Amino acid sequence: MTDQDKNFIDEDLLSTFIIETFEQIERLVMILLQIEQNNHRQTEFIDEMFRLAHNIKGSSGVAGLSAVAEVMHEIENLFSAVRNGQYTLDNQAIDLLIDFCDEFSSYLKKEIMVISFDSEKWLNKLKSLKKHEPAQSAKENAVSPLTLTAEDKLKLHTWQNEGKKVYEIDLSFAPEAKMRSASVLIFLRFIRNYGRVFTTAPAEEAIPNENYSTFKIILVTENHLSEEDQNTIVSYPIGEEGNQINLRDWADKKKPNQRDAHPDKVQSSDHSFNRTIRVDTDRIDKVINQLGELITLKTSLFHLYKNGYKGKTTWEHFSRVLQELEQIVSSLQMSTMDLRMVPVHQLFTRFPKIVRDIAKERGKKVELHFVGADTEIDKHIAEELIDALTHLLRNSVDHGLEDLKEREALGKDPTGHITLSARQEGSHIVISVTDDGRGLNLERIREKALSTGLISENSRLSDEELIRLIFSPGFSTAENVSELSGRGVGMDVVKTNLKKLQGYIDVQTQPGQGTSFMLKVPLTLAIIQSFMVKVGGQTFGIPVTDVIQSIVIKEKEIHQIGAQRIYYRYPETIPLVHLGEYFGFPFPQDLNRIPVVIINYGRGHVGFIVEELIGIEDIMIKPINKAMGEQNQIAGAALLGNGNIGLILNHQQIAQQALKIN
């Protein structure tokens, strides 16, 4: 970029341009990946691709990035050629376009005012695509795609509901047919006697190119064409023998199957989680209205204070205002939390490209499917899950899925399938990565753990305990170290990231059928309900999302097995953790009244012995000062209603450490 170009860049528009362009580029990559899997779908998406290129070109020009606009103009020309049936996107073109999207995305993350975009390189590459186009015209094979936008389809459906008729007409030309453009123009003049030509494929301005074997027309008529009229149309002479005309009622027959439908549901996303959140205006209006009610209550409280106490009526008025205040604050809290929530598809859209690149490197065919992409999640949690999900997806492609020959020998679909799904369970969100591959080899895991000294020959581990070994630091079953695997850091990263989020992971596997990794994390970590307890005079909180119940038991109900305390509650045996001993905060205890908080842990329960049960309180978690060092047992701190500071426990980590569960 020259200094002269920089003078034309509008810095005020750059931030908006970058956010919107990231969304459009991500959507373009999603479409290209789908076309790569099913090449025939380019006719379905070409209008949207053209529109994306046109929008980026226009916004680049407005922002002053003339070099980018020039490249987008060339891409727009390429898509226009595809739309007019003059060019077909093959793997070479798709690879080039995806590479461009990668480099362009990287450019947007940099200091645009300082770094230049290499437009010449991409202009030359894009122009070379057309140079390598087959010399022979595509007349014999080209079938012009008739692509209708959602708006077009809505218009046609509306006209049909009004009683008008919509017809689709195909003019098919024999391979040796000449003067096709003349035949088409004459036929168009003839067919307009019957109604309105809504659209054609290719477009009318491309008719002189004659690089089509079929010309399509959508015709709208006021009334149903008689049988005589239909026969006149289909028998109309259009040049040489071998050419023919077909006429049929138009119907919107596009009903994608379930697998095709999932990727389409993934909308464009806000790429930069940590800078912006797109918020629906209805949510903002709701918060503003609630803030107005809060201001009214503040005024009421001020008048009560100013007027002073005047008997029972004042106290009753004060009580009513407090009840209203509690309701409004609770509602405002939920509405404010909603502002931080983003659809999980904003997280999912970054993964198809990752899966595609790994699959190509490994020589595998993989399809990635999405389920529950509209589920909402806290923006901060979505950010923290990126690394964990990236490692799990890499693991599924590299280790989980068999190669093409192995899958064919097993009678499986040569294309491996990975499903990334999300669902809400109460105040948690569960995100699963499921593949249809070979499943975990538990014997291989055991052998590797023995060879590395992770377990001994005498160890008798259940299947679940063996599976947990894969999350040990440095553990890997890969034979060779590569760029993707073999160093044993991936699963350890997953486990570490989940600890930060007070979440955990469950693994289900079946030999020869696949593996599913299920990550369960809170919907939000900003404002939560916490069950408050006292231990050695210090107040602690346990997020209620995992609290099953609080009970009071007697010492004689506690059984000792080795060094482990056990509470038996039919039909379950619950291990107990004495938090006073765990933290080194001793406290006296009535042996006939021992408070216990029972929480979820993995597929079972754990009980925490505490000094005193306080109750549930709404809290806003604040991070612990980094100067205190790593505090795995503490998730954060909160200012309590009584003015004291409460520490929020990372209860899953405490249960794991206290019970020595790996």
Image (tube, rainbow, N blue to C red):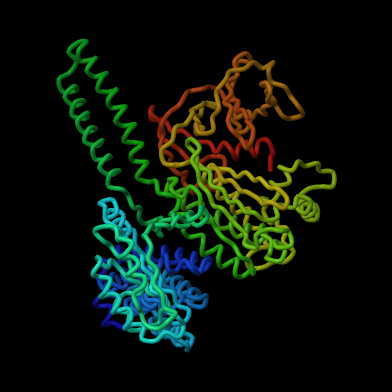
Tell me the residue at 48%/73% (across/down).
Answer: 94
Task: Tell me, yes or no, if residue 49 can be seen here.
Answer: no
Q: Quadrant of the N terminus?
A: bottom left
Q: Is residue 587 above or below residue 370?
A: above
Tell me the residue at 54%/33% (across/down).
Answer: 546
Q: Nearer the viewer, residue 458 or 431?
A: 431
In which quarter of the view is residue 562 placed? Answer: top right
Q: Quadrant of the C terminus?
A: top right
Residue 18: give x, y in percent of width and height.
Answer: 34, 65
- Of all residues shown, which one is farthest toward the left? 307
Q: Is residue 158 left or right of residue 498?
A: left
- Of all residues shown, which one is farthest toward the top? 312
Q: Nearer the viewer, residue 256 or 114?
A: 256
Q: Is residue 322 left or right of residue 97?
A: left
Residue 558: give x, y in percent of width and height.
Answer: 69, 20
Task: Tell me, yes or no, if residue 565 can be seen here.
Answer: yes
Q: Nearer the viewer, residue 286 or 564?
A: 286
- Of all residues shown, which one is farthest toward the right? 457
In which quarter of the view is residue 400 placed? Answer: bottom right
Q: Nearer the viewer, residue 570 or 79?
A: 79
Q: Is residue 580 left or right of residue 133?
A: right
Q: How many marks?
A: 0
Tell me the residue at 40%/66% (across/down).
Answer: 25
Residue 382: give x, y in percent of width and height.
Answer: 46, 50
Residue 12: give x, y in percent of width and height.
Answer: 25, 66
